[in-house]
Amino acid sequence: MDGYDVTPGRVIAVLGVYALLLAVIWRIRPRVIDRVEAPTAIAIALVWAVSVFVANYLLYRLGVMSFLPWVNNFLHTFVWIGVCLTILYLAVRETVPMWQQFLLFFAFSLVVKYAEKWLFGTWDHDHFFGIPGNFAYIVGWSLADGTYPILTRFVLRHVARGAPRLVPT
């Protein structure tokens, strides 16, 4: 766990990267989440943020993921995944084909992982489930992040049947 450089200046820089990407997302969806979508957005954000925060640590303990310092893990899961990717999902879910959604989530995640690697020294594992190399590790987890819209849509459609305030699309 040595070698990580999570300083206040670097945290601000990572938040700046998130903000820049959120500005790009805002170009896709230039409006605020409306009242009908708010419960859905909050549910999506919390489920993803909490589950990925815990999963990142457990996957580290299993040896399939590098350690993310707690600040990095929190920023990555609650700010990036919880807030930014939820807004991206709401922006594209009805207007962009699923394969393009996959590519968008993959590309945004790739940028974030390399930014966090550059600024914090994280995302430094040397393989992705047996595929050697740090490049394979970062690309592999970014491809996994590409499934965010697919998994979200699937779960939301099933959960929304019993939760009338959630928008199932």
Image (cartoon, grey):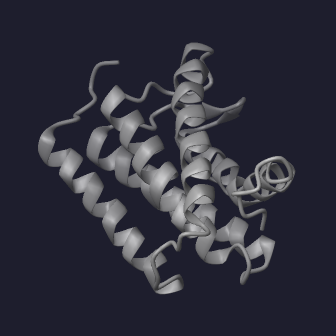
- Frontmost residue, 10 versus 118: 10
- Frontmost residue, 112 versus 139: 112
From the top left corner, tell me how far across and down residue 70 is, in percent.
Answer: 35, 27
| 81 up-or-down from 62: above or below | below
- Quarter of the picture holding the C terminus: bottom right
From the top left corner, tell me how far across and down residue 13 is, in percent.
Answer: 22, 55
Farthest residue, direction left = 9
Residue 134 in the figure: left or right of residue 159: left
From the top left corner, tell me how far across and down residue 137 is, in percent.
Answer: 59, 40
- Quarter of the picture holding the N terminus: top left
- Frontmost residue, 13 versus 167: 167
Q: Residue at x 46, y 50 (%)?
A: 113
Farthest residue, direction front = 164
Q: Residue at x 26, y 62 (%)?
A: 16
Total numbered labels placed on residues in the image: 0
Residue 137 in the figure: left or right of residue 96: left
Q: Residue at x 51, y 50 (%)?
A: 81
From the top left corner, tell me how far across and down residue 161 is, in percent.
Answer: 86, 52
Residue 134 in the figure: left or right of residue 89: left
- Frontmost residue, 46 versus 106: 46
Which of the 4 image quadrants contains residue 17? Answer: bottom left
| 89 up-or-down from 132: above or below | below
Residue 94 in the figure: left or right of residue 30: right
Q: Residue at x 41, y 34 (%)?
A: 73
